[in-house]
Amino acid sequence: MRPIIRLIPPVLALALPLAGQTPFAWKDLGGDRMELRERGRPALVYNYGPQLREGAPESQRRCCYFFPVWTPAGVSVLDDFPANELHHRGLYWAWPIVEADGQQFDSWKNLTVQLRPAGAPGVSATAREALLTVRNLWQAGGRDIVREDLRLTVFPTRDGAREFRVQLIWEAISGAVTLRGATDPGKSSGGFVAHFAPAEQRVLRADGQVVTKDEDLNRHRSVEVEGVYAGKRAVVRITPDERNPGVPYQWILRTRGFAGASFPGRTGAIDGYTLEPGEPLTLAFRVRVADMR
């Protein structure tokens, strides 16, 4: 039996506007894209319906991820449909192996698992935070196999940085569903990941230490990617919540601009996580985007 992980309340922002005022505004852009603005400038877009870039094959149509994400100064730090790896999409969560009913599916590259919203996102904004909540369904083999609840909490900018928290709750609907990372030797792709925009310069750091070459399966508590985008320097830090099961996670890090917290990872004792009906799994991640001089 897997432990039930309870809903974790969002952390309050440290710096607040005047009482009763909010710096945030939500806008539905059409095309199943919900944008958040802070003081009139775009902060991020949640793609709540299927997206397909012109020229990309129909098999790469996908849903339910964040892109673009901007720093407070307006630097776009992520990429979607990168030319040489079309399956990557901004900030998202996916697994190369999803097992259900004795069959193997994929929400990572081949997208034989498709996410679909059960309804439009709910959004709100106060002086303390902007919120987005939505329920998604994982569909594979002609049926719904997993129920996903997403809660996004965005905090006001402070000292040139904006932080947001992504909380995800998954529960198998009618039968066990097992999540596994890639089976390639020395890898375990699959989990909460970000694909970064092309950069003129880039530095990866794990737990504050510079990463000089591609890396797999090493455990870290946080990872950040610093880059220069069109002459502007910005940094993104991803920190899994310490209350997540299995932390600190193994990471897949690529100097070309990719960082993923692998869940459940791969060890001598672990190579998968099984979702059971009635036993939800909750994971939460903190993301910090900042401008640098």
Image (spheres, rainbow, N blue to C red):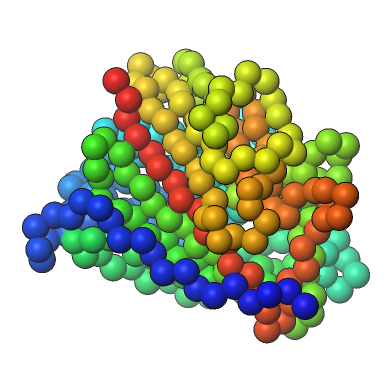
Name the side, left or right, on which 140 lies relative to 85. right
Quarter assignment of residue 70 = top left
Name the side, left or right, on which 97 lies relative to 248. right
Quarter assignment of residue 261 = top right
Q: Position of residue 146 (x, y in %)?
A: 68, 72
Above or below 48: residue 182: above
Q: Quadrant of the N terminus?
A: bottom right
Q: Position of residue 245 (x, y in %)?
A: 65, 61
Q: Quadrant of the C terminus?
A: top left
Q: Position of residue 124 (x, y in %)?
A: 28, 68
Q: Is residue 144 visible?
A: no
Q: Residue at x 77, y 63 (%)?
A: 273
Number of residue marks:
0
Q: Residue at x 32, y 44 (%)?
A: 162
Viewer-nearest residue: 89 or 252: 252
Q: Position of residue 176 (x, y in %)?
A: 79, 75
Above or below 198: residue 106: below
Q: Residue at x 34, y 55 (%)?
A: 154
Viewer-nearest residue: 122 or 292: 292
Q: Is residue 270 visible?
A: yes
Above or below 230: residue 288: below
Q: Residue at x 63, y 70 (%)?
A: 281
Viewer-nearest residue: 282 or 222: 222
Quarter assignment of residue 104 = bottom right
